[in-house]
Each structure stands twice: as C-alpha cells, then as structure tokens.
Amino acid sequence: METIRELLLPAATGGRRGRAVEAALRDAIRTGRLAVGTRLPSSRDLARQLGVARGTVTALYEQLTAEGYLLSKHGSGTRVAPIDGPAPKPEVSAAKSPAWEFDLRPGLPA
C-alpha cells in the first residue's frame, strides 16, 4: 500500500498546494486507497514531508474532519473515518398515518 507521502506528494507540488493536498487526501479516502482506521501522520510531520506550512495541514485535517472523512481526537492522532453511503430514507405509507380521535385545530366547532 502506498504511504501517505506517496499519495499526497504530487498534489503538494504546484500552486494552491493546501487545496490540492486536501483534494488528494479526500480522493484517497473515497477510493479506498486509504483504508478505514489508517492513522495519519501528525500535522508537523506531514507538513515537513510535503514542504507545506503546519497550519495548512491543520486546516485540511480540520476541514476533512468536519466533512466526516477523518476522526480526530486530541492525543490519539487523526484516523480515516468509516464512510457510509447515504442513509436509506424510511418509507412512509399513507395507511400508517395516525388517525386522530379528536380534531383540535383552532376555528373548528366542537
């Protein structure tokens, strides 16, 4: 399996490196190249490996955590989160709608 650095280094070369690295990491998670539970390097270590600022890595970790791709816990590091497909919508049938005994809407005669 490729290392994090090998996955992200091509994205770290060029203009908007922070956005490119974020997109590359998101893509690696979506496609399964980074398995669920994979521990990512610390922000300092990854920033040093890619030649970007630590704040850039911290911001992309925070963004991907907010999007649900990463799990972050202070002192435990950052890991790849399980990605679930869209939740199935419950089927609502008209036959199972509640039948009210009393109609308590205002403006109706008692």
Image (cartoon, helix red, strand yellow):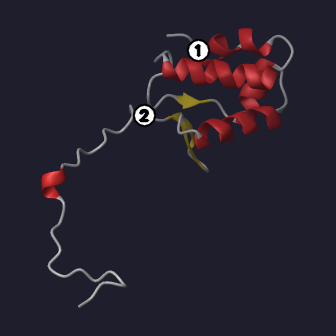
The image quarter containing residue 60 is top right
Q: Check residue 3 in the rendering and tell me which mark sits there, or answer none.
A: 1
Q: Amino acid at mark 2?
A: Pro
Q: In this rendered view, identify the residue nearer to me: 17 or 58.
A: 17
Residue at point 35%, 39% (across, down): 87
Q: Check residue 82 in the rendering and tell me which mark sits there, or answer none.
A: 2
Percent position of residue 7, x then y: 62, 13
Estimate the spatial distance between the alpha carbons at disc 2 and disc 1, rounded to whole Å.
19 Å
The image quarter containing residue 44 is top right
Percent position of residue 99, x then y: 15, 69
Is 56 rendered above or below residue 2? Answer: below
Is 62 rendered above or below residue 47? Answer: below
**In the figure, is residue 66 to the left or right of 11?**
left
Is 76 rendered above or below residue 48? Answer: below
Percent position of residue 40, x then y: 59, 30
Residue at point 42%, 34% (across, down): 82
Which quadrant holds the C terminus? bottom left
Mark 2 nearby-residue class (10 Å; few <14, some 14–19, many ≥20): some
Instruction: Give the mark nearest the N terminus, 2 or 1.
Output: 1
Percent position of residue 13, x then y: 81, 11
Q: Secondary structure at mark 2?
A: loop
